[in-house]
Amino acid sequence: MRAPEIALTDLEGRSSALRDLRGKVVILNFWASWCVPCRNEVPALERLYRTYREHGLVVIAVNSGESAEQVRRFLEQLQVTFLTAMDSDGTTTRRFAVRGLPATFLLDREGWIVGVAVGWREWDGPHARFYLERVLRGKQP
């Protein structure tokens, strides 16, 4: 299934479209700072991003309903460097039919959803890395 066409707004209020990332492999992670499993997986997503960003990986953390100040404080604590998008009104969360947090979608270079995970995952563990490396090489998972 192709990912829904959405606009993403970052912490500074700049907007961009998900389709602008075609050609990259995208991990779209829906989260909130109050969500304990989300808090646990953000550092693993950061490690994964730092390892694979030079290979075409983009990680986007879509925050569900918190203020920019809350999100900034949380990200600074964890020294997060990947893109964070704000979903203050829940539009993006609804477009992806997210029912619980954390929820993560893996998009291939053409914008097709090739993986979905609901709940906490060890994103920099061997299973996730194996799966991601296949997608980065353009192979079906």
Image (tube, rainbow, N blue to C red):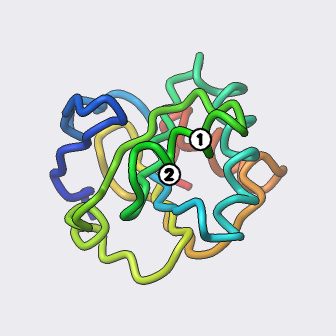
- The answer to whether 1 is drawn above or below residue 74 in the figure is below
Query: Residue at the spot x=48%, y=37% of the render?
Result: 138
Q: Which of 119 and 52 is in front in this view?
A: 119
- The answer to whether 48 is drawn above or below residue 14 in the figure is below
Q: In which quarter of the image is residue 52?
A: top right
| Contact check, label 1 and label 2, Cβ < 8 Å | no
Query: Residue at the spot x=36%, y=35% of the render?
Result: 11
Tell me if mark 1 has few (under 14), some (14-19) or many (20+) residues whose alpha carbon lies within 10 angstroms of its own: few
The disc label shown at residue 120, or none: none
Residue at the spot of label 1: 73
Farthest-out residue, front = 69
Compared across the picture, whether 112 is left or right of 14 comes to: right
Q: Which of 69 and 138 is in front in this view?
A: 69
Percent from the top left, x then y, of residue 81? Answer: 59, 27
In the picture, the quarter occupied by the C terminus is bottom right
Residue type at the position of mark 2: Gln
Residue type at the position of mark 1: Arg
Farthest-out residue, top = 54
Residue at the spot of label 2: 140
